[in-house]
Image (cartoon, helix red, strand yellow):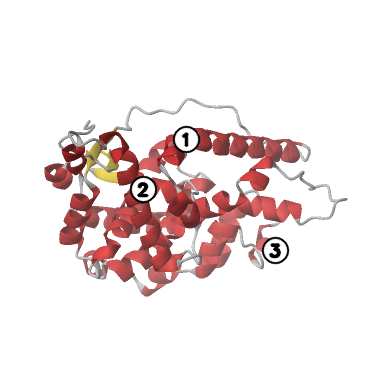
Amino acid sequence: MEESFHYLTQKGSDSALNLPKPELFSKFARNVTKTRARLKLFDDTDGYTDGLVEALAVAHAKSREWLNVPHRSLLRSWIRHLQPDLGIYFLHEDPVATTHSALPAVGITLDELRAFGPGDLDGLGRRLYAFSHEVGAYLAQLSNLFERFGKPIELVHKTLALERVRFSHNDFLGAKVYNTVTEAMRPREERFAGAALMAQAQINCAAHALPLLLADRANLLFRIQFLTAYHARNTLSAIIPWLTSELPTFTEGETAILTSRKLRNLCAHYGLRGAAVAAIGTHDPFSVMIESQSNASREDVATLVRRWLTAASSSLRARVSKSTLRKVRALFGDHN
């Protein structure tokens, strides 16, 4: 969304591609940026390693503060020691999201997190509804714009086939989970435990959850899977360098593709530049641009990326999974 907005609003007022400024970017511009940036993990230029680590630590502290509000009396104060402050969602055995990583992932900035009080978290649902409403309104604007050029965008909701999707949820004491992650994953520093779990969840989403929801050749699936592999590889190499030794061997050419800055820019920014020339007038311009930047077919690149994601997911699952975390589930909480 952000890239299309910047491209279309930089056109002259007399351009046929002129797009009225949508409410999304007058109300939530910074949040759109941070939503996209969270996929970068430690590569986010707004804070890098320390920024993500602090965002997760603040999200943990604010969650604990919010959930402990009902237990202020003397008689109930002991409950605070048993109050869960972290929820983890799983697809089968694989963690795919946590409530701590969800706060920065939905675009809440670090400054906003620091300023959050219990009342702000109570109103989070209304805020997310307003944000998602403006996202939908912007997509409708794009649809109307491209329909004028004979390129309609189908926005009609289609029922998802969710028979194979089995998400579950468990509640935890965050400190116990992060201690378990530290013992299991052996990160360079204890403060990286939350980021390691977030990276694992993003890998699992890209490798296992999104393929159940998106078409196999969907451009969005390719983009998210490549970006996840690119940024998670960088982050995990910094956090848990032993992971590389447990993954299958990749050739020099395969590693060059997995670490290709040009492919990364193509997927993150539609950074066309020289690739645009090769794609003009083709039936499948995105695939042509992938090939021009990698000297490999789209199918081969997609297969390589999925091989890395699957291998990383499997290696991390052996250390942190729904089963391995069962012993530290909160006594009082939701478990399904």
Going by the numbered disc 2, the residue's amino acid type is: Lys
Note whether 192 is above or below 225 in the view shown.
below
Judging by the rendered image, the residue that carries numbered circle 2 is: 62
Residue 128 shown left or right of residue 191 in the figure: right
User: Which residue is tagged 1?
Assistant: 123
Q: Position of residue 195 (x, y in %)?
A: 33, 59
Query: Which residue is at the front of the view, 271 or 57?
Result: 57
Whether residue 147 is visible, yes or no, is yes
Indicate which disc, 3 or 1, sits on the residue closer to the N terminus.
1
Q: Upstream in the sequence, badge 2 or badge 3? A: 2
Identify the residue at horizontal 51%, vertical 63% (top origin).
Answer: 264
The residue lying at 70 percent from left, 57 percent from top is 280
Judged from this view, the residue extending furthest toward the bottom is: 252
Instruction: Tell whether 231 sits left or right of 266.
Output: left
Q: Is residue 109 above or below residue 251?
A: above
Contact between labelled residues 1 and 3, with CB atoms less than 8 Å apart: no
Where residue 205 appears, x then y in whole percent? 36, 46
| In the depicted structure, whether residue 58 falls above or below residue 243 | above
Residue 330 placement (x, y as % from top left): 18, 39
Q: Nearer the viewer, residue 74 or 21?
A: 74
Q: Which residue does the numbered mark 3 point to in the structure image?
A: 277
